[in-house]
Image (cartoon, helix red, strand yellow):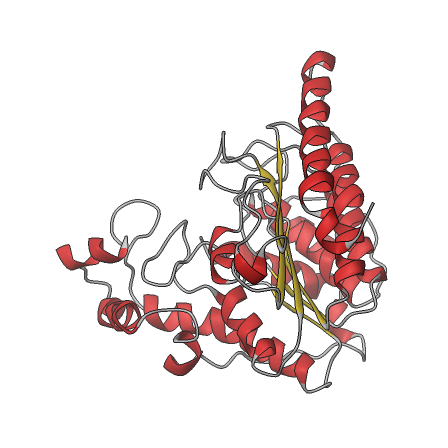
Amino acid sequence: MKPIRLKQTYELLQSYKLFENPNVIISDPTPASKEDLLTFHSHDYINAIEVFNDGNWSQNASNFNLGPGDNPVYKNIFDASRLSTGGSIVAAKMIESGKVNRAFNISGGLHHAMPNYAYGFCVFNDPVIAINQFLQKGLKVAYIDIDCHHGDGVQLAFYDTDAVLTISIHESGQYLFPGTGWVEELGTGKGKGYSVNLPLHPYSSAEIIVWAFKQTVLQLINKYNPDILVTQLGIDSHFNDPITHLNQTAQGFESILKEFAKLPYPWLAMGGGGYDAMAVARCWSIAFSVMSEQTISNKIPVDYFDKYGVDNLYDIQIPNIDSDYEASTKSYAENSVREIHKLIFPTFGIR
């Protein structure tokens, strides 16, 4: 994923002067240590990424799903991946210590990385590693993933435990990578019922996404009553995203963020996917404003407009789809919600 979208997000946050609020702390990330990485990843995989740090790769790279395609080897891959992961660790420790009650690492949320291979543009799985920081302190975590892609790596990490409730709302794996995230993926052993998946049909509208969220996620979080809320805020669900097919809007994204903000738990947020850079910058600025309890105007500051030509924070033109197709997307969402109510809700005593 191109770091330019992080730069453009940071610049928009600066243009809105959101960092000047006295309740905001900007902290430099510390690169994740190998010990941190080993809480999820294998020795061989970590060592391989370190070897490839010079940007050169060999046939051995394919053993770790690296090479041409989604997971290229690039110069400083080890350093950059440790730094983005370290940002989530620093954020987790700041929450854990009570220094802050909310933290946002826009460079994090790399939820596809697997224990011994890269996957879906992700090298190290910072959500898992950050959550492990909380688990080491005996804290219970609810992880909510609203990226358009299923949060498969995080689900895998905690599939057999009830210490973490994982919830992923995503475009159905029938139509989109990684092809997983079905309602029936419930967890196993002590974790049965603590892995929740809400697949949606392509072109589901913001209204449908928010409706499905409210019909399932809030009740589950409240019943689970975690010590910590962790959210992955990928915005590749936006209708302008070039590689996905949901029709989320900045307004719909904000509605979900405001629901998170109403919850009484310490809150660690991470970025994630998003391949329309301006949608990323706008929506993560909205997220930061909600998390820091600041109000920002729809009118993009002049200095940012002059540089990037974007004049509105919120979406003005929203796509319309055929009414029959919209009905089918609603029916698909209703079925997913119904199945969650049937298969998951009894675990939590929800009727």
User: On the rendered image, what quadrant is the C terminus found in?
Assistant: top right
| Horizontal side, residue 251 vs residue 122: left or right | right
Can you tell which quarter of the image residue 144 is in? Answer: bottom right
- Place of residue 194 in the rendered image (x, y in percent of width and height, measured from the top left): 63, 56
Kindly tell me whether residue 110 is visible in this rendering: no
- Place of residue 272 in the rendered image (x, y in percent of width and height, measured from the top left): 55, 55
Q: Nearer the viewer, residue 323 or 242?
A: 323
Q: Nearer the viewer, residue 180 or 56?
A: 180
* Residue at image location 71% in from the left, 53% down from the top: 347
- Place of residue 206 in the rendered image (x, y in percent of width and height, measured from the top left): 74, 35
Can you tell which quarter of the image residue 198 is in? Answer: top right
Q: Nearer the viewer, residue 337 or 274?
A: 337
| Horizontal side, residue 306 vs residue 349: left or right | left
- Place of residue 161 in the rendered image (x, y in percent of width and height, measured from the top left): 56, 64
Outermost residue toward the left? Answer: 59
Can you tell which quarter of the image residue 220 is in? Answer: bottom right
Q: How many circles with numbers are drawn on the protein?
A: 0
Residue 195, placed above or below residue 30: above
* Residue at image location 49% in from the left, 51% down from the top: 152
Kindly tell me whether residue 82 is visible in this rendering: yes
* Residue at image location 73% in from the left, 18% down from the top: 327
